[in-house]
Image: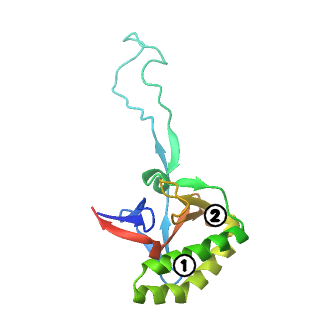
Amino acid sequence: MLVYQDLFTGDELLSDSFPYKEIENGILWEVEGKWVVQGAVDVNIGANPSAEGGGEDEGVDDQAVKVVDIVDTFRLQEQPPFDKKQFIGYIKKFIKEVTAKLDAEKQEHFKKNIEGATKFLLSKIKDFQFFVGESMSDNGSLVLAYYREGSADPTFLYFAHALKEVKC
């Protein structure tokens, strides 16, 4: 199994059990999330609770909860939304920090294509939910989520160059 960690914090942000598609010349990874029900499982064992002396409210008081699989699995923490000015400030700092950690070949690819990816992200800025890893570090990479038109499930965007692949 492959796990993708934040290059800066080491937080686990993704794994190979969630297939990704490269977009914006490989700068971003696009991953489809899904709403899933978690919690209360109703198991019918064939017993008649009233005959057994049990009442309606007997047993575990469990509540089913709907969660997004990626957010829940990697314990992503939602952040307040960014406006364009805040996002540009973040991305300038982020570009410098990522570039410093890349080898020469990856640096060239990143520098050449990050501007186009940034324009793409800015065009959707009002649609995004912003997440960071479990540590909630200010220095971590952002994970962005939005809903495509007509979709009930979110799509997540990751900065590919800010992920470190780890074999488990």
Decide: few, some or many residues near mark 1? Use Cα within 10 Å; few <14, some 14-19, many ≥20. few
Image position, residue 159 (x, y; %): 50, 73
The one nearer the camera, 152 or 66, is: 66
Between circles 2 and 1, the one closer to the viewer is 1
Determine whether 18 is above or below 89 in the image.
above
Type of colouring? rainbow
At x 47% / y 79%, what residue is drawn?
100
Of the residues shown, which amino acid type is indicated by label 2?
Answer: Phe
In the picture, measured across the screen, residue 9 lies left or right of residue 24, that is left
Image position, residue 126 (x, y; %): 70, 66
Which label sits on residue 96? 1
Q: Secondary structure at mark 2?
A: loop
Q: Which quadrant of the rendered structure holds the N terminus?
A: bottom left
Q: Quadrant of residue 150?
A: bottom right
At x 39% / y 66%, what residue is drawn?
4
The one nearer the camera, 143 or 18, is: 143
Distance between the Cα atoms at labels 2 and 1?
Answer: 23 Å
At x 48% / y 57%, what residue is drawn?
133
Which label sits on residue 128? 2
Q: Which quadrant of the rendered structure holds the C terminus?
A: bottom left
